[in-house]
Image (cartoon, rainbow, N blue to C red):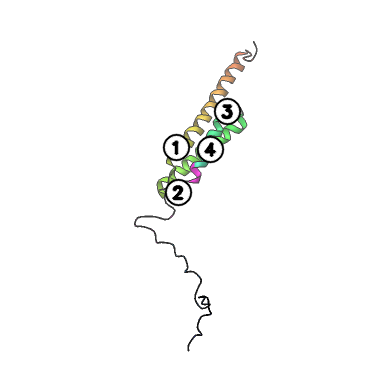
């Protein structure tokens, strides 16, 4: 069976317009998805920083500090197991969340002693 000759102008309707794109194979030692920054580590660091900034709002700072420490510990474990990046962010989240909790504990102790002593620390 023979095909009819292509129409004038060089367009052949029986040929594809462009070759299909085939992505190159991964290089030696490259693991797909490895090297990406762990999202929980980023969330831990951001939550820890926010918990420090909100130290004057105890009802926001304490839960945010707890969330930062928990996310940091979980993401640190994931980073070590999966070979992802974000170890520093996970450690920063643990440190800032822990610092926020320590600031809140010191604030409670300071206010507790002030109330027990019977002095008003806010008056002149």
Q: Residue furthest bottom?
A: 1
Q: Which residue is drawn at the image coordinates 58% and 32% (left, top)?
A: 61
- Is 83 on the left or on the right of 61, as rendered? left
10 Å neighbourhood of mark 2: few (<14), some, or many (≥20)? few
Q: Does the magenta run of residues contain 33?
A: yes
Q: Disc 4 designates what residue?
A: 46
**x, y percent for residue 111:** 59, 20
Q: Which structural element holds mark 3?
A: loop
Q: Which structural element holds mark 1?
A: helix
Q: Earlier in the sequence, mark 4 or mark 2?
A: 2
Q: Nearer the viewer, mark 3 or mark 2?
A: 2
Q: Which residue is drawn at the image coordinates 60% and 29% (left, top)?
A: 58
Tell me which corner region of the image, top left, top right, bottom left or bottom right, holds residue 110. Answer: top right
Q: Disc 2 designates what residue?
A: 36
Magenta residues? 25-41
How much space separates mark 1 and mark 3, taking CA atoms?
20 Å
Q: Which structural element holds mark 4?
A: helix
Q: Disc 3 designates what residue?
A: 55
Q: Earlier in the sequence, mark 1 or mark 3?
A: 3
Q: Disc 1 designates what residue?
A: 91
């Amino acid at each position: 069976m023979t095909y009819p000759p292509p129409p004038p102008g060089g367009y052949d309707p029986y040929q594809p317009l462009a070759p299909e794109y085939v992505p190159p194979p991964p290089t030696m030692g490259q693991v797909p998805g490895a090297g990406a920054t762990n999202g929980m580590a980023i969330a831990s660091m951001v939550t820890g920083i926010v918990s420090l900034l909100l130290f004057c709002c105890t009802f926001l700072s304490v839960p945010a500090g707890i969330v930062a420490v928990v996310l940091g510990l979980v993401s640190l474990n994931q980073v070590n197991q999966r070979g992802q990046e974000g170890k520093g962010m996970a450690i920063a989240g643990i440190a800032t969340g822990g610092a926020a909790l320590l600031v809140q504990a010191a604030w409670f102790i300071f206010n507790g002693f002030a109330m027990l002593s019977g002095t008003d620390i806010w008056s002149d």
